[in-house]
């Protein structure tokens, strides 16, 4: 899932590996929840701001660090993401959230995260069996059922949640 970030940041000599510690390499660029023994740069790519910051951090590893304007141009084809890139939203919608990565997205959209008296229950598809509520459920596709491209993945998830507004 980090490959698009690496590519956009200008790194062309890399190997994609599910198990970086079993491969020779200088640095592993991986999702923040992943753990490895080798030197690594953990990144987050759930929200537009996280995607932006991840591209910026990875580009610092190259000879040609990208400017903010260059990074913003990667969002040009993703209007819903551009909207959230530089703005803070507050909405009068209370949600219960079943996953940490979804809390990032839900907060970015401006929903209030609560544990009771909620309007919607938002959960990732892989936790469907653990959801105890039966009404106003919003299932969000997780890693296996979405594009590995972080822009397309975020666009899908934000689109689903924007339909609640």
Image: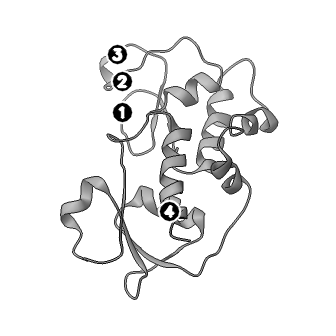
Q: Which residue matches tag 1? A: 36
Q: Residue at x 26, y 53 (%)?
A: 126
Residue 69, image x, y percentages: 81, 37
Q: Which of marks 1 and 2 is nearer the N terminus?
A: 2
Q: Which residue is drawn at 61% across and 30% down?
A: 58
Discs 1, 2 touching: Cβ within 8 Å: yes
- Residue 161, labelled with which disc? 4
The Cα–Cα distance between marks 3 and 2, rounded to whole angstroms, is 5 Å
Q: In the rendered image of this protein, does residue 45 appear above or below residue 120?
A: above
Q: In the rendered image of this protein, does residue 135 appear above or below residue 154?
A: below
- Residue 23, labelled with which disc? 3
In the displayed structure image, the side of residue 58 where residue 26 appears, left or right: left
Q: Which residue is drawn at 51% across and 59% down?
A: 104
Quadrant where the image shows the N terminus = top left
Q: Nearer the viewer, residue 41 or 138?
A: 138
Q: In the rendered image of this protein, does residue 119 appear above or below residue 149?
A: below
- Residue 20, labelled with which disc? 2
Farthest residue, direction front: 163
Q: Which of marks 2 and 4 is in front?
A: 4
The Cα–Cα distance between marks 3 and 1, rounded to whole angstroms, is 11 Å
């Amino acid at each position: 899932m980090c490959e698009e970030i690496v590519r956009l940041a200008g790194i062309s000599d890399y190997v994609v590996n599910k198990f970086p510690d079993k491969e020779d390499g200088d640095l592993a660029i991986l999702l923040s929840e992943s753990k490895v023994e080798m030197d690594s740069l953990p990144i987050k790519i759930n929200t537009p701001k996280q995607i932006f910051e991840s591209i910026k951090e990875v580009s610092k590893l190259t000879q040609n660090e990208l400017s903010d304007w260059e990074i913003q141009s990667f969002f040009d084809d993703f209007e819903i993401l551009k909207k959230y890139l530089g703005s803070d939203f507050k909405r009068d919608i209370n949600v219960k959230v079943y996953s940490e990565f979804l809390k990032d997205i839900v907060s970015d959209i401006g929903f209030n995260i609560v544990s009771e008296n909620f309007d919607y229950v938002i959960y990732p598809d892989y936790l469907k069996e653990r959801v105890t509520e039966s009404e106003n459920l919003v299932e969000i596709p997780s890693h296996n059922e979405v594009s590995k491209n972080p822009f397309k993945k975020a666009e899908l998830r934000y689109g689903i949640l924007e339909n609640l507004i």
